[in-house]
Image: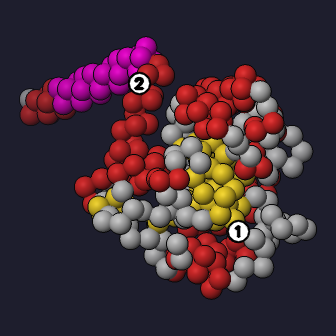
Amino acid sequence: MKKICIFIAVGFVLLFISGCMGMKQQTEGNQQAVKEEKGQAKETKQTQQKEAAELDKQKWIQQKEPVALPILMYHSLSSGNSLRVPKSEFAAHMKWLIDNGYVTLSPEEAYQVLMTNSTPSEKFVLITFDDGYSDNYTKAFPILKQYGMKATIFMIEQSIGRPNHLTDDQMDEMIANRLSIESHTIHHLELNRLSKKQQEEELKGSKAFFDQRFSQRTRMVSYPVGRYNEDTLKLAKEAGYQMAVTTEPGHAKKEQGMMSLHRLRISPGLSPESFGRLIEGN
Ligand SMILES: [Zn+2]
């Protein structure tokens, strides 16, 4: 009799547990269905929430003086011309930033820094690469990943997957690891030489492409070869970018205009000390 009682009791417990699990699975299934129904709108909302959580605005420091944001400009990590920086030098620069307590920003954070004049730390930097060379993935990405640093690559839409340029898979992997892909237009043409209509196509078209390709809000554009004119400034804003960067030297400040922010060109041969002076002087 005692044995039967135990048997029945165990049976009830098992039934109860399996019932609970079934309910849980069903709930998860429903949630999945709802998620799929809401589609992209939901994903965008989740991305925004994630970004907001990561920023933790409560701890940001309101600055008294106008913020001067160092936006570093790299291209290829190799050697051969004044735009190419060897990997070993890049590694030394990144180490200098870490050793000196710098926080790396995403484009969204950089925008908040300039618009609210508050910062997540006393030391902050936006690292950028123009043109989307393959070595950004093979050489820069492992170093950035090792330190958990954020960086932004300005990709030319038509260069994706071309020889010596980033592939779709490489960009996806980098985005999953704190890097951002922003626009360097469709064809990398000097915008100041184009008609208004052509400029509009390059700016709007590439933004629509990157928005869709990465299910993101593309926030930044880097003007090819740093060339732009009055129309460019207006069209970039109308296209929906929050910030545009040039090759004019110096720290980025809101007063320059959000569509014509300056950058610090990182040339080859820069020692970590000179690199540090470039960033700390404004
Ligand atoms: Zn370029």
Q: Is residue 16 magenta?
A: yes
Element type at mark 1: loop
140 or 264, which is in the foreground? 264
The amino acid on which the numbered mark 2 sits, given as a three-letter code, is Lys
Residue at image coords 61%, 72%: 94
Residue 39: x and y in percent read 47, 19
Frontmost of labels 1 and 2 is 1
Question: Going 65% across and 63% down the picture, which residue do you hit?
Answer: 249
Q: Which residue is mark 1?
A: 266
Q: Residue at x 56, y 73 (%)?
A: 279
Q: Is residue 125 above or below residue 94?
A: above
Q: Nearer the viewer, residue 5 or 173?
A: 173
Count neighbours of disc 2 (C-alpha within 10 A) and say few if under 14, some if 14 to 19, many if 20 or more: some
Task: Report the disc number at residue 42.
Answer: 2
Split into 4 quadrants, where in the image is the N terminus?
top left
Q: Is residue 279 magenta?
A: no
Left or right for 181, reference 161: left
Please provide the residue range marked out in magenta: 12-38
| Residue 254 drawn above or below residue 188 | below
